[in-house]
Image (cartoon, grey):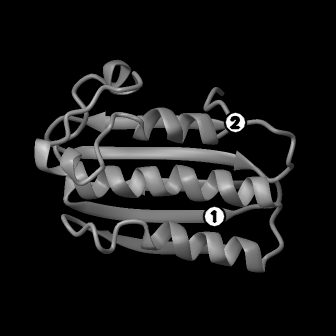
């Protein structure tokens, strides 16, 4: 089963709408609660990053027999130093965004924490693609390793 969402940029009033819709659909499909929660959190964090840093993007979600695959793609400025960006508390968000309560530097770490496997492909000046996989078995996994 495949779902596609456009994530509008620079509009915090719409930020999180795709993850909220996906959460609703996963519940309707009877996906275990912890998997629904982890999927919603990981996807929400990616959406916020797209709004703050990339002017929006696209989300593609595939529900397979044993996992949920989330691919978040944008055409923003890219991530210059992925290792640094993965550090909790590191943020390049503008002050105004931080004053709105976003940009605390927890997005990528939370995405990794809530996924079973996560990869980031980013090119400066081109954009970023984050792929997250979340197992459908509720075995308490979730560390972004792989």
Residue 53 location, x and y as percent?
Answer: 21, 48
Earlier-in-chain disc, 2 versus 1: 1
Q: Nearer the viewer, residue 21 or 117?
A: 21
- Disc 2 crowd rating (10 Å Cα; few below 14, some 14-19, many 20+) is many
* Residue 75 visible within the image: no
In the image, residue 89 sits, relative to residue 11, either above or below, namely: above
Q: Which residue is mark 2?
A: 142
Element under label 2? loop
Total numbered badges shown on the rendered structure: 2
- Disc 1 crowd rating (10 Å Cα; few below 14, some 14-19, many 20+) is some
Q: Quadrant of residue 26?
A: bottom right
Element under label 1? strand
Task: Please state which of the two labelled residues, at mark 2 or mark 1, is closer to the viewer.
Answer: 2
In the image, residue 16 sits, relative to residue 75, either above or below, namely: below
Where does the N terminus fall, quadrant-wise? bottom right
Q: Tell me if 58 is positioned left or right of 133 in this view.
A: left
- Determine the residue positioned at 44% across, 44% down: 130
Residue 41 location, x and y as percent?
Answer: 56, 53
Q: Nearer the viewer, residue 59 or 94?
A: 94
Q: Nearer the viewer, residue 38 or 100?
A: 100
Residue 57 location, x and y as percent?
Answer: 31, 62
Q: CA distance from mark 2 to mark 1?
A: 18 Å
Q: Tell me if 98 is positioned left or right of 131 in this view.
A: left
Where does the C terminus fall, quadrant-wise? top right
In the image, residue 123 sits, relative to residue 98, either above or below, namely: above
* Residue 87 visible within the image: yes
- Determine the residue positioned at 39% across, 58% down: 47
Residue 39 location, x and y as percent?
Answer: 63, 55
- Determine the residue positioned at 79% across, 76% down: 29
Q: Which residue is mark 1?
A: 62
Q: Tell me if 144 is positioned left or right of 80 in this view.
A: right
């Amino acid at each position: 089963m495949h779902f596609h969402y456009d994530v509008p940029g620079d509009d915090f009033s719409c930020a999180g709408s795709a993850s909220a819709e996906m959460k609703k659909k996963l519940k309707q499909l009877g996906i275990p609660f912890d998997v629904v929660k982890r999927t919603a959190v990981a996807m929400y964090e990616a959406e916020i990053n797209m709004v703050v840093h990339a002017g929006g993007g696209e989300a593609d979600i595939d529900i397979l027999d044993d996992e949920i695959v989330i691919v978040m793609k944008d055409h923003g400025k890219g991530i210059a130093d992925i290792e640094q960006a993965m550090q909790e508390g590191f943020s390049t968000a503008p002050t105004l965004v931080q004053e709105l309560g976003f940009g605390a530097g927890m997005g990528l770490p939370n995405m990794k924490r809530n996924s079973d496997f996560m990869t980031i492909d980013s090119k400066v000046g081109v954009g970023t693609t984050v792929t997250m996989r979340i197992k459908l078995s509720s075995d308490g996994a979730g560390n972004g390793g792989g």
